[in-house]
């Protein structure tokens, strides 16, 4: 069921090599690290697709309960994040399966390249989330809370089931949950945002 779900495709968001090196654990990248990064980017960037699905829902926060009307979650940290919000956004973002195939391939034959591809994927999906959140803040003309994801703080991964129930992840953006509630493609994010009136 995809009623109320909005799907969007994006062009490549701005890329940060510093963030990629941070994800890769390269504090001070050497020339060979930079050459490896360039080679990996040349190979993977044309294969990425930037897709988001989201749904805007009414929200009531009471104690540690966040009631999105279609589902509710108990989390003190999420409740604090969404305090004074009367609406929320549930969203999922992914850069697709192709990078997973490359990571699997190179993890066997070139671990350094596999690690760099992992870092690129992490930076790319986070940059996509940033682009989506910035666009939402502009279009809503309201303040958005920082995003908060299942598995973070005291919000269990079990919350992924609630996200899937309202977004139909496989049908809208091609994200699948395994038995451990981890996502495939691996470079995917689900999260909650609160909407506050400014001023």
Image (spheres, rainbow, N blue to C red):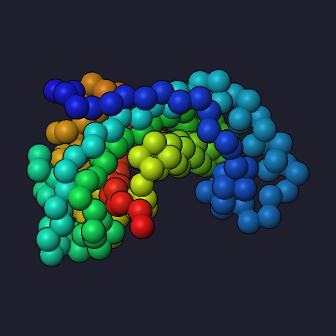
Q: Residue at x 65, y 24 (%)?
A: 46
Which residue shows up at 77% across the image and 42% down it? 36
Q: Nearer the viewer, residue 87 or 36?
A: 87
Quadrant location of residue 193? Answer: bottom left
Residue drawn at (83%, 42%) of the image: 35
Against 181, is 94 above or below?
Answer: above
Q: Residue at x 19, y 39 (%)?
A: 166
Name the spot of residue 131 as percent of width and height, x first: 54, 44
The reply, left or right, for residue 138 in relation to residue 71 is right
Where does the image place residue 53, in percent across and percent down from the top left? 35, 34
Most foreground residue, 81 or 18? 81
Measuring from the top left, give residue 113's x and y in whole percent. Answer: 67, 42
The foreground one among 7 and 74 is 7
The answer to whether residue 182 is visible is no
Residue 139: horizontal and vertical position, in percent?
Answer: 45, 42
Report the quarter where the N terminus lies: top left
In the rendered view, does 38 fall on the left or right side of 158? right
Q: Is residue 167 above or below residue 122?
A: above
Above or below, 81 relative to 120:
below
From this viewpoint, is residue 30 visible?
yes
Residue 41 placement: quadrant = top right
């Amino acid at each position: 069921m995809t009623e109320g779900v909005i799907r969007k495709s994006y062009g490549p968001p701005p890329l940060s090599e510093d963030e990629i090196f941070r994800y890769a654990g390269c504090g001070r990248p050497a020339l060979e690290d930079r050459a490896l990064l360039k080679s990996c980017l040349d190979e993977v960037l044309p294969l990425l697709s930037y897709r988001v699905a989201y749904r805007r829902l009414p929200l009531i926060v009471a104690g540690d309960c966040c009631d999105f009307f279609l589902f509710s979650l108990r989390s003190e940290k999420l409740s604090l994040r969404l305090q004074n919000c009367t609406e929320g956004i549930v969203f999922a973002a992914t850069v697709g399966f192709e990078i997973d195939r490359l990571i699997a391939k190179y993890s066997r034959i070139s671990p350094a390249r596999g690690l760099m591809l992992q870092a690129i994927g992490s930076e790319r999906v986070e940059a996509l989330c940033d682009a989506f959140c910035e666009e939402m803040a502009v279009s809503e003309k309201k303040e958005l809370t920082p995003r908060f994801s299942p598995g973070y703080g005291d919000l269990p991964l079990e919350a992924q089931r609630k996200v899937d129930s309202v977004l139909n992840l496989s049908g809208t953006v091609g994200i699948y949950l395994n038995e451990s509630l981890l996502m495939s493609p691996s470079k995917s994010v689900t999260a909650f945002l609160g909407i506050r009136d400014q001023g």
